[in-house]
Amino acid sequence: MRKLIKSIYRLSFKKIFPTTGEIIESILRKELKDCKSVLDLGCGPSSPLKYLKKEPRLTLYSVGVDIFEPYILKNLEENKIHSEYINTDIFKIDFPANSFDCILLIDVIEHFKKTDFQNFLPKLEKIANKIIIITPNGFIEQKTYDNNQNQIHLSGWTQKEMEKLGFKCNGLSGLKFLRGQEWEPKIKPAFIGDIISNITQKMTWNIPALAYHLVCIKNNKQI
């Protein structure tokens, strides 16, 4: 039955109601199409840039930065998504002005105290003209996993707060109340919960206050 439902969804609805991962890939394709260099802060063990890097026609130079060494090692041994990797606290990065066309922080800023990120943002704006952030809408509790204390959530950001910082926001991952900690669907079985959440994504794209995730983009200049 599960296989049948999944097959029906893939054949009939997936193009109309894409998954969160597919939407993120589409966003990156659009926003990075004129970019030649990307700084991926808090890149984790696997970045969605992997979908773009598979295309030989895309000559995208990227640097992945993460404080957790096992993630960097996994990237170097298995994923090899980025051109270079740096194992450090992202607050310690030191690049000259305009070093990159774009900076990514995907599921990252919720791991910081708000004041720390607010103080860090001007530095990012000097390094790149465009900043793309994906973060939960409001505070979502998350504890440590992967033996990585840095996975704990310390803050939650709202649409109004991100817009106040100069970002344009859209909603991602469907209606917020359909998912819990670590993005787990509340409706069971989980694959049904995922499908229902995917179906609501088009609604929340233009009403980000209702979404589970916020997509926040800031352009200091036109690239």
Image (cartoon, rainbow, N blue to C red):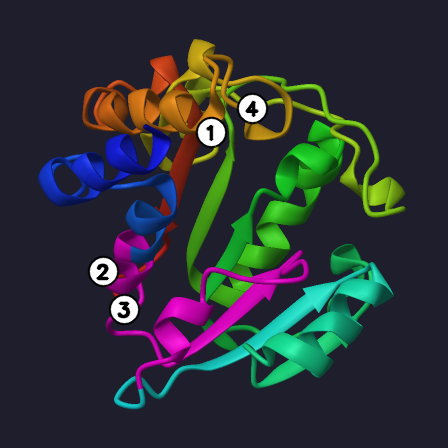
Looking at the rendered structure, the number of numbered marks drawn on it comes to: 4
The answer to the question of whether label 1 and label 4 lie on touching residues, with beta carbons closer than 8 A, is: yes
Say left or right for 75 vs 46. right
Label annotation for residue 162: 1
Residue 213 shows up from this direction: yes
Residue at screen point 75% across, 38% down = 116
Residue linked to disc 3: 223
Highlighted magenta segment, given as a residue range: 26-55
Q: Secondary structure at mark 3?
A: loop
Frontmost of labels 4 and 2 is 2
Residue linked to disc 2: 30
Q: Earlier in the sequence, mark 1 or mark 4?
A: 4
> What distance separates the C-alpha of mark 4 from that of mark 2?
24 Å
Residue 172: give x, y in percent of width and height: 35, 32
Quarter containing the C terminus: bottom left
Quarter containing the N terminus: top left
> What distance separates the C-alpha of mark 2 from that of mark 1?
21 Å
Q: Secondary structure at mark 2?
A: helix
> What distance separates the C-alpha of mark 3 from that of mark 2?
12 Å
Frontmost of labels 3 and 2 is 2
Q: Nearer the viewer, residue 220 or 46?
A: 46
Q: Earlier in the sequence, mark 2 or mark 1?
A: 2
